[in-house]
Image (tube, rainbow, N blue to C red):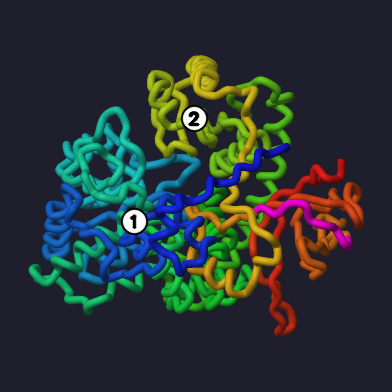
Amino acid sequence: MLKKWAVCPPINPSFANQFPAWNPVVLQLLANRDITEPGVIERFLKPNYAADLHDPFLFVDMEKATDRILRAIEKKESIVVYGDYDADGVSATAVMSSTIEALGGVVKAYIPFRETEGYGLNLKAVRELHGAGARLVVTVDCGTSNIKEAAALKAAGVDLIITDHHEEPLQLPDAFALINPNTKRDRYPFRYLAGSGVAYKVATALLARHRQYPVTALPEGWEKWLLDLVAIGTIADLMPLLDENRTLVRYGLTVLQKTKRLGIQQLAASASTAVKDLNERAVGFQIAPRLNAAGRLNHASTAYRLLITTDPAEAAKLAEELNATNQERQRLTEQITDQATALIGEVREQPILSAVGDDWPIGIVGLIAGRLTDRHYRPALVISRRKGEIVGSGRSIEGFDITAGLRQCDQYLSRYGGHSQACGFTVKDEASLQPFLDQMASLAKSQLDVATLVPVVSIDAELKLEEITWELLAELEKFIPFGSKNQKPKFLATDISVLDVQTVGADGKHLRLTVSHLTAEPRKLIGFYFGEWNARIKPGDRIDIVFEVDVNEWKGNRELQLKIVDLRMSEVND
C-alpha cells in the first residue's frame, strides 16, 4: 500500500536556543514527542526511580484499598486475585498475588478461561469464589465494566477491590474500592498505566503502609524485583512509554536482564535469547507473544504459573508448552486471516471492515483484526460465533475511537471494553449482530474520509547519510526504551545513488543495498521484506528512503547499518 511520508516540522528556534550545545537531532526528537520543558526533558532522558514515580495515594481509593487488603492479610481472610488472560493480565496477577503472599496473606489467583468465561468477572466465577469462602476479591487488569458481578459480590458479603486501567463505561460498578487512572472520578496524574502498572502502584502502597499492621515485614526495596513483570505487561499492552511508564519500563528492563524468575529464563532460552539481552523489542516480539499464546488457545494459568514457579523442571516444561502453543497460534492466525480476507472481499469504500465466522478461536480474532487494519488501513471487526456466543475484537486507526463506538452501540452488546485503538465485545444475540455492524459502519463513515485514508509514515527529520555516525547513535540510544508514543526514530534521506542491489534470506524476501549519498563513501542498507524491489531498481538509480539506524554485529565486528522502513524512486530518475 502506498504510504504518505510526513516529516515533522523543524523545531522552533527559541527552543533550540535554550540548548545551544545539544545535538540538533536530539532537540528535534524531543520536540517531536512534545518534550520541551527542561524538567520534563531531564526526566525523559534520565529516568529516576526515586524521583519520577507518582505517589500511589493520589488514587482516590488507595488508602481505603490498602487498609482493606492489609486487614485481610492480618486476619488470614481468603483473598482472591482475579486477573486477565493476556500478558499484561497474567503479569498483573503475579504482581498482586506475589505481594499479598509475601506479606503473609492467604491468597489464590483466579484467571478466567477466555473461551468459556470471557473477559473480566463473570457470575458463575463469582458464585464459585463466594462458595469457596473468599472474603475479598481484588481484580487486576479488569473489573471496571462488571456492574452485575460487583453487585452479586456485595450481596454475598464479599468485598471487591477493582484495580484496572481500561476506559470508563457508561456506569461504574459498586465496589468497595476502585483504582483506575482512566475514570473521571480519579485525578491520578498519569492515565496510561498498564494493568500491571496499576497493580504495582497498589503493591508500593501496601509496602508503604504494611509496617502499621501485624503482617510479615518486607525489606525496603522489595517491590523493585516486581518491575520485570511490570515491564513485560506495559510493553505487551502497548502502553505509551512516556512519563511514569518510561521509568517503570527502563528500570524494569534492568531487573528483567537479571531476573531470578526461572520461567522467564526458560522462555528466553526457548526464543534463543540470552536473559542479559532482553530489551523492549525482545519482550514485544518474543516474550509477550508466548505469554499471550496461553490465553489465546488454552488457559492463561500456564503463563501465570511460568511467571511464579520456583521449580526448574516445571519452568522448563511450561516454557516448552508455551512455545508450542505460540507456534500453533501462528498457524491458525495465518489460516483464519485468509478466511476473513475472503469474506471481506474488495475493500474499496468500506469505512470499517467486518468478518464473521463460525468457531474461530476467540483468542486470535483480535490478532486477525489487527492484521486486517495493518493491511488495509481501516478499522476492523472480527467476530466468531462459538459455543452459543457471538464474540469479537476490533482494531482501529487514528481518527476513529473504536471503544467509543461500542459505547454508542451499547443496546446491541452484553459486554465490551478496551481502548481507542483496540476493543473486545460480546453481541447480545443473532438479531443484534447486523444492526450492530450497520451502526459501527455508520459511525466510521461519519468520522473517516475513506477517499483519503492512507497510512502515514511519521518521519522525525531529514538527514544526510554522512551524518549517521557512532556519535549520533549514542545520542539516539538515550531515547531507549522505544515503544508506543516513543517510536524508534525514523529519518528521511533523498536522492541516494544505488551502487549495488541484491536479495538475501529465504526466497529472496529481503533487500540489501549499497548506496552513496553526497560523498562516494558507500553505506549499507537492509530492507526486510523489500525483496520485490530487486526487480525494480538497479545500480545507477536514485532512491529516497525512510530508515532507522541499527548496528549489525557478526563475529565480533560491529558496523552501522541503516534499516529501510519505506522506499521509493527519487524524482530525479524521471
Residue type highlighted by circle 2: Phe
Residue neighbourhood size for the residue with mark 1, other residues' Cα within 10 Å, grouped as few (<14), some (14–19), many (≥20): few
Residue at 21% across / 45% down in the picture? 187
Q: Secondary structure at mark 1?
A: loop
Give how far apart the Cα atoms at labels 1 and 2 are.
30 Å
Regarding residue 182, the answer to whether it shows in the image is yes
The magenta stretch spans which residues? 492-500
Q: Is residue 244 above or below residue 146?
A: below
Foreground pick, 444 / 474: 474
Residue neighbourhood size for the residue with mark 2, other residues' Cα within 10 Å, grouped as few (<14), some (14–19), many (≥20): many
In the rendered structure, find residue 37 and report the number of the disc placed on it: 1
Q: Which residue is mark 2?
A: 400
Say whether residue 462 is left or right of residue 175: right
Disc nearest the viewer among 1 and 2: 1
Q: In x, y percent, where is residue 500?
A: 88, 62
The N terminus appears in which quarter of the rendering?
top right
Q: Mostly what secondary structure, the magenta segment? A: strand
Q: Is residue 312 located in the magenta-colored stretch of the structure?
A: no
Regarding residue 228, the answer to whether it shows in the image is no
Residue at 28% across / 62% down in the picture? 53
Mark 1 and mark 2 in contact? Answer it, CB < 8 Å. no
Identity of the residue furthest to the bottom in this view: 556
Q: Is residue 382 above or below residue 54?
A: above
Q: Secondary structure at mark 2?
A: loop
Q: Is residue 324 above or below residue 380?
A: below
Foreground pick, 368 / 507: 507
